[in-house]
Amino acid sequence: MAGHSQFKNIMHRKGARDAKRARLFTKLAREITVAAKQGLPDPAYNPRLRAAIAAAKAESMPKDNIERAIKKAAGADTENFEEVRYEGYGPGKVAIIVEALTDNRNRTASDLRTAFNKHGGTMGEGVAFNFQRIGLIHYPSAAGGEDKVMEAAINAGADDVVSGATGHDIYCAPDSLHAVQKAMEEALGEPETARLDWRPTMTIDVVGETAETLMNLLNALDDNDDVQRVAANYEMSDEVMAKLGS
């Protein structure tokens, strides 16, 4: 019985991973389709599409899926996805911004409100002042050392560079994103990420049950197929993160 239970547990975890990967591919494909529909279907002349394809490749999305998402933009039956932003507060008064691509505002708003309420949060407006709107370009560590990336970012006209274990984040003004992206590509090649994002102007440290409930809320929001990105102004120690991940 123990072996059978172990097999079931392994298959359950694998099923959960596969479902999460399928949701991720759905989100990536939706962004590719919207980017191709709003601009030219050629990534060489469409920075948003180029960034969307790069993000998909970074997640090992199959080439056929990418090409199908681009072609879908030209179809007459393509859903009309709308870019919508939702705001709210999570446990510990953590400010949260949710960006979505949806074909039904009412459904998405209802689903997100349910997630906020279930996990100790509230949806509302007036949250964006906790963040700065920025352009974000991310390169993996393999792109080069900190000095090399810093020099390229300065020459490209970026505002800031933060390097760490996961790679290099280059920040710039929103209006400069495409110009900085192009210059960075000439110096370092294609980035993993190039998009508009939200950078907290202040952060809130969360621990204990508050941290656990907050992560449950953020995971629930991210699991929604309409949600493309979730930003939150929290800080969490490595010890707390490790405990929650165990």
Image: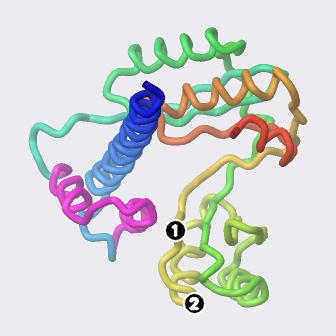
Tag 1: residue type?
A: Glu
Measured in 3D between alpha carbons, the distance from the residue under mark 2 to the one under mark 1, in whole angstroms, is 14 Å
| 56 in magenta | yes
In front here: 180 or 9? 9
In front here: 194 or 38? 194
Residue, x 73% and y 35% (percent of image)?
A: 244
Q: Is residue 83 visible?
A: no
Give the residues in magenta: 45-73
Residue, x 60% and y 75% (percent of image)?
A: 180
Residue 194 higher or lower than 126, as above or below: below
Residue 187: % across, % down: 57, 90
Main secondary structure type of the part rendered in magenta: helix
Tag 2: residue type?
A: Ala
Q: Which residue is mark 1?
A: 192
Quarter where residue 211 is shown = top right
Residue, x 42% and y 24% (percent of image)?
A: 1
